[in-house]
Amino acid sequence: MTFQTLQKTLLNLKDSSNLAKLLDYKNMDKFHQAIYKVANAKSLAKFLRDGHYDYIYTSKELVLKLASIYKIDINAELENAQKLNDELQKYKNSYIYIDTDFKRKNEPIFKIALMQGYRYVYFNKDELCFKSLKEQLEFISKIINNHYKNTKTLPLFGEITGYKFHHLKKDYDFDVNAKLTDKKIIRSTAWLKLA
């Protein structure tokens, strides 16, 4: 909650020139951009993850300096945010791939490549953090179940036949009922490189 206190303080800031001097900003545009980013960040972890560097402060340095100026002890929250970001980093390559019986006939490769995004289910990876594998698979099962309820067919690719959850260099295959299955799903992709 201390980061939220800092954000409220910044949002209610009356004299920005004094704070800019305390932070050693000479350029008021850079100062206002930095304060805006801190004040409007969804969370401390997200602010640190998104990164900020303006040749004066990094994300962490800026938060620590602001906390120091306003005498807010933010160290514990900063440590927790860094732990969350470290945990999230482990899951950056996790994804859910949607399998179909698609066989290319005469579809242009560029069309297939442009439609490739439809073959993935996007989800909030924060939900995987600090949970056991069983809890993570249950969460993914719910995501898959909800997706299949709403989308039984993909444009161009056809009827959905299963899902593959790639997680920590392992694959977990699900059927359309969101149950783990022994069926091995092979991911097929098309990419275009424009030079």
Image: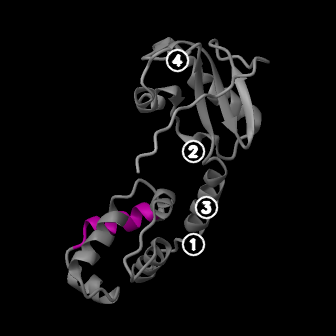
Distance from the alpha carbon under mark 2 to that under mark 4: 36 Å
Q: Secondary structure at mark 4?
A: loop
Amino acid type at image mark 4: Arg
* Residue 126, numbered circle: 2
Picture quadrant of residue 109: top left
Contact (CB < 8 A) between labels 1 and 3? no
Q: Which callout, 1 or 2, points at the residue further toward the start of the chain?
A: 1
Mark 4, other Cα within 10 Å: few <14 / some 14–19 / many ≥20: few
Q: From the viewer's perspective, is 26 left or right of 164?
A: left
Q: Nearer the viewer, mark 1 or mark 4?
A: 4
- On whether residue 180 falls in the magenta region, the answer is no
Q: Which residue is mark 4?
A: 104
Contact (CB < 8 A) between labels 2 and 4? no
Q: Which callout, 2 or 3, points at the residue further toward the start of the chain?
A: 3
Distance from the alpha carbon under mark 1 to that under mark 2: 21 Å
* Residue 80, numbered circle: 3
- On whether residue 5 falls in the magenta region, the answer is yes
Amino acid type at image mark 3: Asn
